[in-house]
Amino acid sequence: MENQRYMQEGLDWKRLLLLTRKKIWMPAAAAAAGALLGGGIYLLLHLVLLPEREYQSVGKFYLDFNCDPEDYNQLSYNGYTWNDLMDTDPILDYTMELLPPEVDRQTVAAATRAEILSDIRLLTVTVTAPAPELAELIMEATGASLVHLGETDGLFRSIRIYGITEAAQILWDNRTWSAVVTGAVLALFVSVMALAFYYVLDDSVYVERDVERRYGITAMGVLAAGDPATETGSAGIFYANYSYLCRGLGEVAFLSADSREDAERAEQAVGNQEQPQRLAAGMPQTGEDYRRLREKDGVILAIRYGGRNGRAVERLLDQLRRQDCTVLGAVIVEADRQFLKRYYGRKERTEG
């Protein structure tokens, strides 16, 4: 039930912005750190941890089939089989005869890729190797093997070399900027969500609205930190509400879920005026404490501003209700004066 009540409180955007304004540097710092981390990880992977550099040589070969063009689609040599054919004995065996013995079949097979990109008569062969000399050596032997295939296989009139490029280093796709932006966005999102969770989980009281919506009791006022116990300023507003709401009552107890000092601070805000006797007390501990509270005409809670004490206040209120103690209302103490000015959009009065 309590969690449901917190969810039903709604989102006070002005309160949220004022409470997080001093933490606004956190998302900015997180975004900067995320950008550095994202870019750093990307560069580390591509410049340090990835495999050694590779080189490629590309060859273009013209396949002159021994048939009419309308029969090309019936040929077994097509774009789906050439890559497999390069590893078969008729081609690979001849290729290996042209290579030195220190180059094994697995190396050649793994380095060679053949594909038909558009025209079935144009074969593209790509050789990838860790050294440019090895890539060119395998490409030269592969080209000679294909030419030999065109001379010996009846499906071809010939296979001719259109062109072979020199082996060149493969340049990695530099996406450092994308990694930087991605890292910044992810870190910014996580930090904003963390602030949002901080706001949601913060059960502190900051303004009168928090008291009334969360606990269902009257908020008599807010005492700013450092305000003197006079009839002006925040103390004056509290005193005015206290005088009206507690008129005709005898003894009133001031309690706090945090400390006796908070209760005494609230009591002092009305202690200099001509009112019936009051009692300043801390958190009740014994049955005698509650008996004395029941003898009073009511109890006023002093709730510490921003004290992250929501659960403690709820526990105190529940206990007072069990003990049949009358709760007249609450006052927020030690509040941030600048926060109050910004939240309510005006300066507190300093003179009558």
Image (cartoon, rainbow, N blue to C red):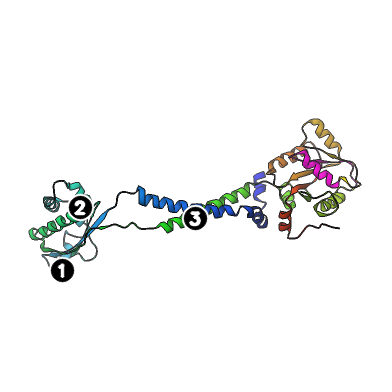
Element carrying mark 3:
helix
Q: Residue at x 21, y 66 (%)?
A: 119
Q: Earlier in the sequence, mark 3 or mark 2?
A: 2
Residue position marked by numbered label 3 in the rendering:
184
**For the image shown, how many numbered marks are present on the structure?**
3
Q: Is residue 113 magenta?
A: no
Element carrying mark 1:
helix
- The three-letter code of the residue at mark 2 reads Leu
Q: Which residues are magenta?
A: 248-270
> Could you give the CA–CA distance between mark 1 and mark 3, rounded to whole angstroms?
56 Å
**Which of the 4 image quadrants contains residue 257?**
top right
Viewer-proximal residue among 87 and 348 = 348
Label pair 3/2, CB-CB below 8 angstroms: no
Name the disc covering residue 69, or none. Answer: 1
- The three-letter code of the residue at mark 3 reads Ala
Label pair 1/2, CB-CB below 8 angstroms: no
Question: Given this view, does label 1 or label 2 mark the residue nearer the observer?
Answer: 2
Residue position marked by numbered label 2 in the rendering:
134
**Which of the 4 image quadrants contains residue 262?**
top right
Q: Residue at x 79, y 31 (%)?
A: 287
Residue 163 image point, x, y percent: 18, 64
- The three-letter code of the residue at mark 1 reads Pro
